[in-house]
């Protein structure tokens, strides 16, 4: 009975993992299939060459026309062509599944973002700006305490010597408070004319390295980065003053959607 239960759990876990990783699995098999088709082409080449020689003897020709060559050898490459077609279907299928999942994720993120905006507006209306600032400061303090600077690498941007902490990526860096605020204001002006900016463009303005997902999320003119960024002064675990850069909502996956 226990063996059957373990077997059933293993099968269910395997199915769940396979469904979650299906795009990567399909694309992986598709790529492997293309390599396999090239191997089949290589193996079919000697047989094709032999058939061409036989056909030239049969027709008493020194050289076959392109049409005659295709008519002579096409059957040799059927397995490679079939495998190649299946591989292409797997790759396209994997990309389509991934695209649908990303669309669902973006829609869910948009609904969450809208709900959070409504919640924040009502909270601000209820407790007032002063109390909200106290809550923001407490959250900033928690960030610094959970990520002590003594255990982190600090990035030198060459733009100042005041310690800063950016909550989205958990990175400490040295800069200048005024330059950080000026960078955010400059990006707000860019959004006004360019309609949107990505997270990586924001980091470039701060003098920080880009991040993997930084081109896929950002801010637009519907909700500017100027309205999103918050600042809080905290002390680190080594007693050094630190500017904590946090966000009310953060960058959105739909930042390029300006409808």
Image (cartoon, rainbow, N blue to C red):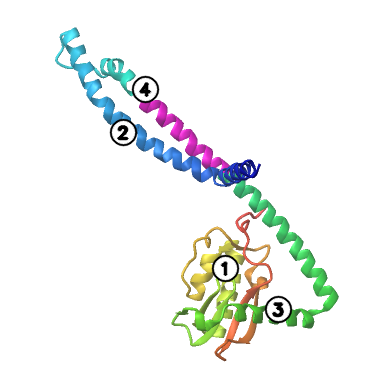
Q: Is residue 186 above or below residue 75?
A: below
> Which stretch did the figure color magenta?
78-97
Give the class, few, some or many, for how many residues have Cα within 10 Å of label 2's Cα (few <14, many ≥20): few
CA distance separating discs 4 and 2:
13 Å
Give the class, few, some or many, for how many residues have Cα within 10 Å of label 4's Cα (few <14, many ≥20): some
Disc 1 to disc 2: CB gap under 8 Å: no
Which mark is nearer the camera, 3 or 2? 2
Disc 3 to disc 1: CB gap under 8 Å: no
Q: Give the mark nearest the N terminus, 3 or 2.
A: 2
Q: Nearer the viewer, residue 220 or 9?
A: 9
Write down the residue under mark 1: 190
Q: Position of residue 175 (x, y in %)?
A: 50, 83
Q: Give the mark nearest the N terminus, 1 or 2.
A: 2
Write down the residue under mark 2: 39
Q: Position of residue 181 (x, y in %)?
A: 59, 80
Disc 3 to disc 2: CB gap under 8 Å: no
Which mark is nearer the camera, 1 or 4? 4
Q: Is residue 227 above or below residue 81?
A: below
Residue 224 - label: none
CA distance separating discs 3 and 2:
61 Å
Q: Nearer the viewer, residue 25 or 186?
A: 25
CA distance separating discs 1 and 2:
52 Å
Residue 82 lies within the magenta run: yes
Which mark is nearer the camera, 1 or 2? 2
């Amino acid at each position: 009975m226990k063996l059957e239960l373990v077997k059933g759990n293993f099968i269910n876990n395997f199915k769940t993992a396979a469904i979650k990783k299906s795009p990567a699995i399909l694309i992986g098999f598709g790529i492997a299939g293309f390599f396999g088709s090239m191997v089949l082409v290589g193996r079919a080449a000697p047989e094709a060459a032999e058939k061409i020689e036989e056909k030239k003897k049969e027709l008493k020709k020194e050289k076959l026309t392109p049409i005659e060559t295709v008519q002579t050898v096409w059957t040799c490459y059927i397995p490679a062509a079939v495998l190649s077609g299946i591989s292409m279907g797997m790759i396209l299928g994997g990309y389509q599944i991934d695209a649908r999942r990303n669309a669902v994720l973006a829609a869910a993120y948009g609904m969450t973002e809208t709900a959070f905006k409504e919640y924040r507006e009502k909270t601000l209306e209820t407790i007032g700006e002063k109390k909200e600032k106290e809550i923001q400061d407490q959250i900033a303090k928690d960030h610094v305490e959970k990520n002590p600077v003594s255990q982190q690498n600090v990035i030198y941007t060459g733009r100042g010597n005041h310690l800063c902490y950016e909550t989205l990526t958990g990175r400490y860096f040295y800069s200048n408070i005024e330059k950080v605020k000026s960078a955010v204001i400059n990006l707000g002006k860019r959004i006004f004319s360019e309609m949107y900016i990505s997270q990586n463009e924001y980091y470039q303005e701060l003098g920080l390295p880009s991040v993997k997902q930084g081109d896929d999320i950002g801010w637009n003119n519907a909700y500017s980065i100027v309205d999103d960024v918050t600042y809080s002064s905290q002390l680190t675990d080594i007693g050094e003053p630190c500017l904590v850069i946090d966000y009310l909502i953060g960058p959105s996956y739909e930042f390029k959607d300006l409808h």
